C-alpha cells in the first residue's frame, strides 16, 4: 500500500511539474509573440552619447521633483475673481508635439515654455461642423465667437454653404469676443504676424462665407453674377469700416496688399491687389479723423515703438509686410540696423500693451502667432520651432508685464499639424537632427518628420516610396531645409487631434478638462465680466482680498440674505413665544 501511495504521489508531482513547465513555456511563447509585435531594440547604429544632469541617475531626485510638484498643486488656490483684462493667445498650428519639440529646441526635454508654467491646463476638440480636420477659419469662429461652423467660413452659420454670395446676413452672422468687450466699454486690440486679413485674425472682426475674400478682387472672382450692391463686403473693408474693426484701438500685423489698389506700391515696393481703386489705409485714417480721434499708421519697427512709447494717438494701425510677416529667423538675417528691422511678435505685443494699459474699464487683446502654421505647411520644422519660441517669449512678456490678480491670459491653438516626434533618440540629441539609422534600409532618419507634404520629394528617390534618399549630407542647420514626409502633397495638412489650453490669472481654473473649442470664448467672457447676452449680470470689480479666491455676485448674495433673514425671524418668533 505504501509503495502504491508513493507511486501515486510521484505521478502527481510529475504531472504538476509538467503542467508548470508547460505553463511557463506557454507564457514565454506568448511573451515572444508580443515582442515580435512590438520589438524594442537597445542597439543603435547612430552614435550619440546621452546628455543629462547627473542628478537624474539618483532616484531621490525624481521623488523630490514629484514632492515639489505636489506641494505646488496643493498650494494653488482657485482665483474666482473677475478679470479686468484678458489676453488670448493662439499659436496657429501649435500641436502638442510642436510644444514638446520646442522644449528640446530650447536645450532640454525638461524645459517648460512660459505658458506651460501656467497652473491650469485643458484640451480643446478642434473639428468643425463638416470636417474632421479643421482649418483656421472654422476654428477661429469657434474659439472667438462660441459657435462651430463649416470649414473655410468665418462667423457665418453652418446652414450657409461656403462661397455663398447672397444669404441672410442678419440671420446667419454672429459676433464674438472683441464685440462683447467693446459693448462692455473695454479697449480692444489685435496682433498677428500673418496677414491681418488672414483667417485667424479675421475671425475677431469679420464675417465671411469664404475665408479667401480678403479683398474685393477675390469677392468679384467668386461672385461674378451677383449685383455689386449685394456682393459681400471683403474682409479688409470690414476691418476699416465694420463696427468691430473701426473700434480696435491697436491693429498690428501684415498684409498691406489687400488694403492698396492695383498700381499702388507699398513701402516694400510691392503692388496692391484691390480692384476698386480704394486705398484702405487712407480710408482708415479718414474714418478716425471724422470721429475726431488721433490715428496713426506705421510700417516699420522704429515708428511703431515711437508711437507706442509716446502714447499720443488714440488709434494705431501697423502693417509691416505685403503678405505674411517675415519669419523670426529671416528678421535676424536682415542686413540693416536692429532698430530698422521688421518687428517681431513679442515687440508687437509689447507695443499693443503700451497702447491698452491704463484703461479704467480694462482691455481684451487677441494675439496670433501665425507663422508656426505656415512653416509646418512647408515641412520646415526649424522655422516652426523658432516661431514657437518667439510665441513663448511674447507670452512671457505679457505675463511679466501684467498682474496675475487682474489679468487673465489664455493660450491655445486652433488645430494641430502632422509633425511627428519619433524614433528612440538619446537624451540631449539635437531634436532637429538625425535620430538613428534604420535597420531595414540602413539609412538615417530624423527625429522630426511629417505625415505628408512637400518634404516627400526630399525623402524618396525619384518619388519611389520603396527607396529612401540618404539624408546624411542634408544641412539640417539650414532653416529652409524641408523635413521628411511620407505622402506627397503640395502643402502639408493640419492634424485632427486635440490641442492644449493653458490659463493663468482670474478664473483660470475654468479652463481645465477636455472642452469643445467653442466653449473657450464663453469662459473668457464670463471671467472678464463681458458678453452679458449670455445671461450673467455685470459684477462690480472686487476689492483686494490679498489674493484669496472669490467675489460673490448680488444674484448669489440675495438668496443667502433671504435665508439668513428667515432664520432670524423664526428665532425671534420662538423666543417671543417662550417669553409669553
Image (cartoon, helix red, strand yellow):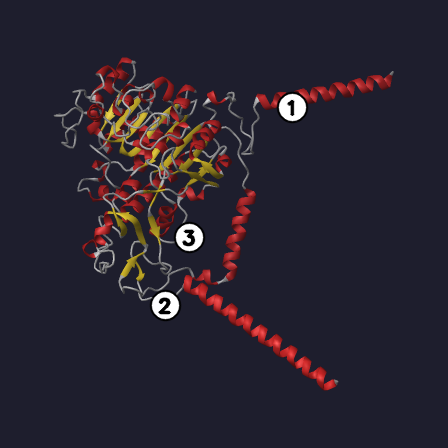
Can residue 54 be seen here?
A: yes
Residue at the extreme bottom: 3
Q: Which mark is residue 43?
A: 2
The quadrant of the picture occupied by the N terminus is bottom right
**Marked residue nearer the N-terminal end (2 or 1):** 2
Percent coordinates x, y for residue 303 in the rendering: 24, 29
Of circles 2 and 1, the one toward us is 2
Of circles 3 and 2, the one toward us is 2
Percent coordinates x, y for residue 217 in the rendering: 19, 25
Percent coordinates x, y for residue 29 in the rendering: 48, 69
Q: Nearer the viewer, residue 454 or 547?
A: 454
The residue wearing badge 3 is 110
Q: Which mark is residue 85?
A: none
Percent coordinates x, y for residue 540 in the rendering: 52, 22
Can residue 312 be seen here?
A: no
Looking at the rendering, which quadrant does residue 372 occupy? Answer: top left
Q: Assess disc 2: are there few (<14), some (14-19) or many (≥20) residues with their C-alpha within 10 Å of its C-alpha.
A: few
Mark 2 residue element: loop
**Looking at the image, is 48 positioned above or below residue 447?**
below
The residue wearing badge 1 is 560
Looking at the rendering, which quadrant does residue 275 occupy? Answer: top left
Judge left or right: residue 198 versus residue 395.
Answer: left
Q: Nearer the viewer, residue 238 or 553?
A: 238
Q: Assess disc 3: are there few (<14), some (14-19) or many (≥20) residues with their C-alpha within 10 Å of its C-alpha.
A: few
**Marked residue nearer the N-terminal end (3 or 2):** 2
Q: Residue at x 41, y 42 (%)?
A: 498
Judge left or right: residue 189 versus residue 21.
Answer: left
Mark 1 residue element: helix
Amino acid at each position: 500500500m505504501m509503495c502504491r501511495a508513493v507511486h501515486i504521489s510521484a505521478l502527481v508531482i510529475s504531472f504538476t511539474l509538467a503542467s508548470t513547465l508547460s505553463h511557463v513555456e506557454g507564457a514565454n511563447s506568448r511573451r515572444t509573440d508580443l515582442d515580435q509585435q512590438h520589438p524594442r531594440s537597445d542597439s543603435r547604429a547612430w552614435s550619440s552619447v546621452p546628455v543629462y544632469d547627473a542628478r537624474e541617475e539618483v532616484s531621490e531626485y525624481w521623488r523630490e521633483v514629484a514632492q515639489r510638484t505636489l506641494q505646488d498643486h496643493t498650494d494653488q488656490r482657485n482665483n474666482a475673481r473677475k478679470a479686468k483684462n484678458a489676453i488670448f493667445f493662439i499659436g496657429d498650428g501649435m500641436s502638442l508635439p510642436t510644444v514638446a519639440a520646442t522644449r528640446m529646441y530650447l536645450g532640454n526635454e525638461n524645459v517648460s515654455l512660459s505658458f506651460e508654467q501656467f497652473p491650469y491646463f485643458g484640451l480643446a476638440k478642434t473639428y468643425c461642423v463638416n470636417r474632421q480636420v479643421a482649418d483656421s477659419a472654422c476654428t477661429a469662429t469657434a474659439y472667438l465667437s462660441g459657435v462651430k461652423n463649416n470649414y473655410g467660413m468665418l462667423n457665418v452659420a453652418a446652414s450657409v454653404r461656403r462661397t455663398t454670395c447672397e444669404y441672410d446676413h442678419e440671420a446667419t452672422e454672429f459676433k464674438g469676443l472683441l464685440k462683447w468687450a467693446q459693448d462692455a466699454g473695454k479697449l480692444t486690440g489685435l496682433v498677428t504676424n500673418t496677414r491681418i486679413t488672414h483667417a485667424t485674425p479675421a475671425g475677431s472682426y469679420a464675417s465671411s462665407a469664404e475665408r479667401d475674400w480678403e479683398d474685393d478682387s477675390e469677392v468679384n472672382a467668386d461672385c461674378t453674377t451677383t449685383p455689386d450692391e449685394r456682393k459681400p463686403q471683403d474682409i479688409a473693408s470690414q476691418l476699416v469700416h465694420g463696427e468691430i474693426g473701426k473700434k480696435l484701438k491697436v491693429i498690428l500685423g501684415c498684409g498691406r496688399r489687400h488694403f492698396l489698389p492695383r498700381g499702388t506700391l507699398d513701402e516694400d515696393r510691392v503692388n496692391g491687389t484691390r480692384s476698386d481703386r480704394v486705398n484702405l489705409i487712407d480710408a482708415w485714417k479718414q474714418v478716425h479723423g471724422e470721429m475726431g480721434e488721433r490715428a496713426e499708421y506705421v510700417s516699420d519697427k522704429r515708428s511703431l515703438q515711437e508711437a507706442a512709447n509716446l502714447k499720443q494717438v488714440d488709434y494705431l494701425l501697423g502693417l509691416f509686410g505685403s503678405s505674411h510677416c517675415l519669419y523670426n529667423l529671416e528678421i535676424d538675417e536682415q542686413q540693416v540696423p536692429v532698430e530698422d528691422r521688421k518687428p517681431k511678435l513679442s515687440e508687437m505685443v509689447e507695443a499693443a500693451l503700451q497702447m491698452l494699459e491704463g484703461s479704467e474699464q480694462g482691455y481684451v487683446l487677441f494675439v496670433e502667432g501665425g507663422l508656426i502654421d505656415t512653416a509646418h505647411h512647408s515641412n520646415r520644422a526649424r522655422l516652426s520651432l523658432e516661431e514657437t519660441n518667439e510665441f513663448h517669449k511674447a507670452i512671457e512678456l505679457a505675463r511679466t508685464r501684467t498682474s496675475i490678480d487682474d489679468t487673465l491670459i489664455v493660450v491655445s491653438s486652433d488645430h494641430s499639424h502632422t509633425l511627428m516626434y519619433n524614433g528612440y533618440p538619446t537624451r540631449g540629441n539635437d531634436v532637429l537632427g538625425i535620430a538613428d539609422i534604420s535597420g531595414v534600409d540602413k539609412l538615417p532618419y530624423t527625429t522630426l518628420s511629417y505625415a505628408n507634404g512637400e518634404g516627400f520629394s526630399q525623402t524618396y528617390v525619384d518619388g519611389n516610396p520603396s527607396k529612401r534618399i540618404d539624408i546624411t549630407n542634408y544641412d539640417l542647420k539650414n532653416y529652409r531645409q524641408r523635413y521628411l514626409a511620407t505622402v506627397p502633397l503640395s502643402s502639408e495638412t493640419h492634424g485632427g487631434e486635440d490641442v492644449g489650453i493653458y490659463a493663468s490669472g482670474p478664473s483660470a481654473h475654468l479652463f481645465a478638462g477636455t472642452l469643445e473649442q467653442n466653449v473657450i470664448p464663453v469662459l473668457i467672457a464670463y471671467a472678464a465680466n463681458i458678453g452679458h447676452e449670455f445671461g450673467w449680470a455685470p459684477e462690480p470689480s472686487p476689492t483686494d482680498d490679498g489674493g484669496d479666491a472669490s467675489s460673490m455676485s448680488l444674484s448669489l448674495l440675495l438668496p443667502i440674505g433671504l435665508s439668513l433673514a428667515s432664520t432670524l425671524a423664526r428665532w425671534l418668533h420662538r423666543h417671543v413665544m417662550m417669553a409669553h
